[in-house]
Image: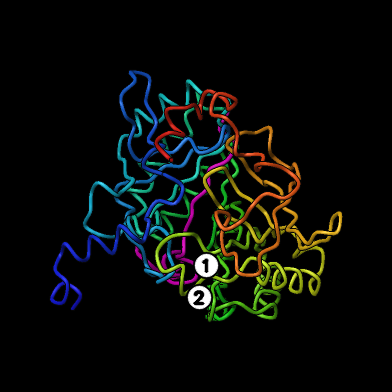
Amino acid sequence: MACLLYGHAGIDAVRTRLNPHPAGQLAFNIPDLADEPLPGVQHKYAETVLVFPRQGQTCHAYCTYCFRWAQFVDEPDLKMATSDMARITAYLRQHPEITSVLITGGDPMIMGASVLRRYIEPLLDPRLRHIESIRIGTKSLGYWPLRFVTDPDADETLRLFEEVVAADKNLAVMAHFSHPRELEPSPVAEAVRRIKSTGAVIRTQAPLIRSINDDPGIWAGMWRAQVRMGMVPYYMFVERDTGPQGYFAVPLARGHQIFRDAFASVSGLCRTVRGPSMSATPGKVCIDGVVEVAGEKVFALHMIQARNPDLVGKPFFARFDPTAIWLSDLEPAFAPRFPFDSDPEELPGLWGPEVLAALS
């Protein structure tokens, strides 16, 4: 219908305004050892690399609020994708500071077991002993739990998981659950049980989404149910500054109150969760609360993860704004700039001037 009304040029114009890459992800296509582009890979933090399998650039759910919608449309220049594990493992061997590989997409679990093996098995090479963990980001447990129970290659997939654990790697299934209803079908519990039996860990995360889960009771109930099932609550994310953010976003002040009220009502085992966190260009910025300092009402924040590792865990402040929904809406308090607003020359070489210029 949109094509009939606006034509492809009109659709492209709308997509451009949706800002498909809020983290400048295409700018973080890194060079390999021959100084050639290594597409489909982000060396996002010093110790973490993201891999986007070419065959995993689709999904089970197509959530309307997904910030990675650009992976699903027929625009090759917008996609992150690779199938060249030889070049990726060569890069990993040259970077012993990398300890974690996140396989993401799209949804990697859309791939069959034999294809998934092509991406995971090379990471078990003894020359990559410094790779301590392999993560798989997926919505499949909430949308397609039979992928791990009755699908023809369910057992083969779980045997692959066992091989990862046997190779002394931590295998973490990063499961996206945005509402406790997604935990209720019986195949979900069976899928969780089977995955855990391989030695893998299931960590859960989701964005805070207006009209869907913007209620502390929903989050508290979801975290408690996940812990009962043996999963580990991990992140509450702020809706990204992309796609239909204007419809689904929750103001930061209200988001923190929702998180705090939910966090206060659960036991310590649920309090492994962190948030609300903005996964922004400088890193993951966590909203710690709204406080009054020197007579001024401000947001207290800190960086859970940062492209400049020196900033991790250091608190900073932003002027209180009840309408702010993203980091770019905030202004620094008690300082002329935020800690991450540094001169490019001050940042580590990995994130030097040429990369930051591409993001500006």
Give the residue type that dot 1 points to.
Answer: Ala
Camera-side residue: 347 or 41?
A: 347
Which residue is pictured at 37% across the width and 67% down the height?
A: 60
Q: Vertical placement of 43 versus 175: above or below?
A: above
Q: Are marks 2 and 1 in contact (CB under 8 Å)?
A: yes
The quarter of the picture where the C terminus appears is top left
Which residue is pictured at 20% across the width and 75% down the height?
A: 2
The magenta stretch is 130-152
Q: Residues within 10 Å of mark 2 (few under 14, many from 20)?
A: some
Q: What residue does disc 2 label?
A: 187
Numbered label attached to residue 191: 1
- State which quadrant residue 168 falls in: top right
Q: Position of residue 124 (x, y in %)?
A: 48, 34
Q: Position of residue 117 (x, y in %)?
A: 38, 44
Cα gap from disc 2 to disc 1, whole angstroms: 6 Å
Q: Vertical placement of 229 versus 164: above or below?
A: below
